[in-house]
Amino acid sequence: MPSGSCVFGLDAGATQTRLCARSLAGGPDLKVFGNAANVFRLGELQTAEILSYLIKRALEQLPEVDLLAIHAGVAGAGAPSTQKALAEHIRSLIDGKDSVQISVSHDGINAIEGALGGEAGLLFIAGTGSGVMARAQTNHTQIDHVGGWGYLIGDEGSGYSIGRRGMAAVGHAFDGGPTTTLTNLVRDHLSIHDRYSLLKSITSPDWKFQHVAPLVLQASSDADAVACAIVEDETALLARQAEWLLKKHPNLNPRFTITGGLSNHEFYVASICSAMRGIWPAAEYTSPKGTPLEGAVQIAMRQITGSGARQ
């Protein structure tokens, strides 16, 4: 358990919210997990309540620590006014003393900090949603991003988009279109076996297209032509966003990495790398150095040194 002076880092996204407490003196971290949080869906106050609940749970387990700083990366918290409001709500809800430094950013800032380890380069975010971020050569705070427009008008290459197209392919197969092993996979894993069970499933309030993405990636790994085409097309669309970003930052350090749930799938990563070879031939793919939660902790640590991290 952390002791003495410590910092808290939080990463709040579409799946869950995670907190890591770290002592400045070293030793094992404390991690606490809670509900998902997204400002666009829940609003500022309810989002702050989820974050504050985790902070208070951690403090209950660490009654003797001197909390110096908190950083929370939160889905939907891109606007400075939202970041300020969340920080104020959190301070009020946890009865935080003024000496505790509290900062809030978009959750993508956690991702790029963790994945690049504070260094320069380009990051693909490929989870439920998607986006591309770039950190400039020598400036921690100079971070730019494209994409991240959400499932209604964007999120190309995301779990949601790949899953939606996978289900569309199953529907096409039911109609007599191209055959695909996805029909067997959704039958075995989701009990979808005909038009009516498909329609019933996707119109259910609990339905999540992103849960189909692993099945599409499984089929693509098994060389299913339909699934391969979906993944290759979606990753090409995401790589196109990186091309737009590189036009604004032509001297960016030539390295990129991928974070998010889809980054664990070999065919997905290979497809991104293939698309990027035609866009940025000099760039090298590297595995992420750390997680978004680790990124949040590092940003909280920097608050103590005065270098800041709000985005």
Image (spheres, grey):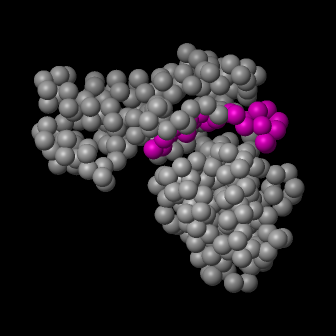
- In this rendering, would 195 be left or right of 16? left
Q: Measured from the top left, where is residue 212 in percent x and y?
A: 32, 43
Q: Is residue 124 magenta?
A: yes
Label tally: 0
Q: Measured from the top left, where is residue 8 in percent x and y?
A: 69, 66
Front residue of 159/24: it is 159
The answer to whether residue 24 is visible is no
Q: Is residue 32 above or below residue 216?
A: below
At 57% from the left and 25% from the top, the residue drawn is 241
Toward the bottom, the furthest residue is 63
Quadrant where the image shows the C terminus: top right
Q: Measured from the top left, where is residue 189 in percent x and y?
A: 22, 49
Q: Is residue 102 magenta?
A: no
Toward the top, the furthest residue is 278
At 79% from the left and 69% from the top, the residue drawn is 100
- In this rendering, would 198 be left or right of 34? left
At 86% from the left and 58% from the top, the residue drawn is 305
Q: Measured from the top left, where is residue 226 in percent x and y?
A: 28, 25
At 31% from the left and 54% from the top, the residue drawn is 206
Q: Which residues are magenta?
A: 123-144
The answer to whether residue 73 is visible is yes
Q: Quadrant of residue 55?
A: bottom right
